Image: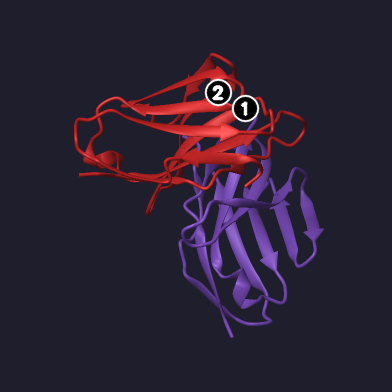
Amino acid sequence: QKEVEQNSGPLSVPEGAIASLNCTYSDRGSQSFFWYRQYSGKSPELIMFIYSNGDKEDGRFTAQLNKASQYVSLLIRDSQPSDSATYLCAILYNAGNMLTFGGGTRLMVKP
Amino acid sequence: DAGITQSPRHKVTETGTPVTLRCHQTENHRYMYWYRQDPGHGLRLIHYSYGVKDTDKGEVSDGYSVSRSKTEDFLLTLESATSSQTSVYFCAISELDRSYEQYFGPGTRLTVT
């Protein structure tokens, strides 16, 4: 069973702080890692993907991957109230072309 | 929503009736997916398609069937709806280059009474 685990939250951070969202996975045969953002009542939207160990930065977002420890994280710098949403981690395993999603972490950024 | 529409957007139906949900894309992407999203379970894959008439099962396929007769349309049928199939259903598309990124439609909220 390929599992993707996220703390459901809510994770509450003050405006302007760094929000750190974490995701762990069970299967070392993993290939690609994705972060989706989902506003309440809306569909998920892709915000970042990462394939290689290390950091990948895109604006205020940084994805971090550590395959040896089997975790992927998303950092949001200078958090804004508009970042308040549920963040879904998804993993593509080598054996297939299907994504396995975690349950999501709800982030609340307070003004 | 990356050229993806879903219909209907909301539906209420009775237990035991068949229901068909439609996903339509204008991106000419090869892969299409149906997910359901429930509180506490995240997104779970029901079925997916990798081409016209080519489909395969996902994690939670029991009670569902799919069809894809054209590249742009992917239909999900609940053969005999049950209350446990009350959920939000999302369609997604992707194209197999290096990235496997999936883009989601707006969702259909289905209530089975």
Residue placed furthest toward the top? B53
Q: Relative to B110, is A75 on the left or the right?
A: right
**Quick one: SS at disc 2?**
strand
Would you identify the image quadrant in which residue A92 lies?
top right
| Colour red belongs to chain | B
According to the picture, the residue beneath numbered tag 1 turns out to be B31
Answer few, some or many: residues within 10 Å of disc 2's Cα (few below 14, many 20 plus, some between 14 and 19).
many
Q: Residue at x 59, y 59 (%)?
A: A22
Which badge, 1 or 2, is on the more N-terminal residue?
Answer: 1
Q: Amino acid at mark 2?
A: Ser
Residue A29 showing in the rendered view:
no
The answer to whether tags 1 and 2 share a subunit is: yes
Q: Are marks 1 and 2 in contact (CB under 8 Å)?
A: yes
According to the picture, the residue beneath numbered tag 2 turns out to be B49
Residue B30 showing in the rendered view:
yes
Q: Residue at x 67, y 80 (%)?
A: A17
- How many labels were placed on the picture? 2
Q: Relative to B40, is B113 on the left or the right?
A: left
Q: Amino acid at mark 1?
A: Tyr
| Colour purple belongs to chain | A
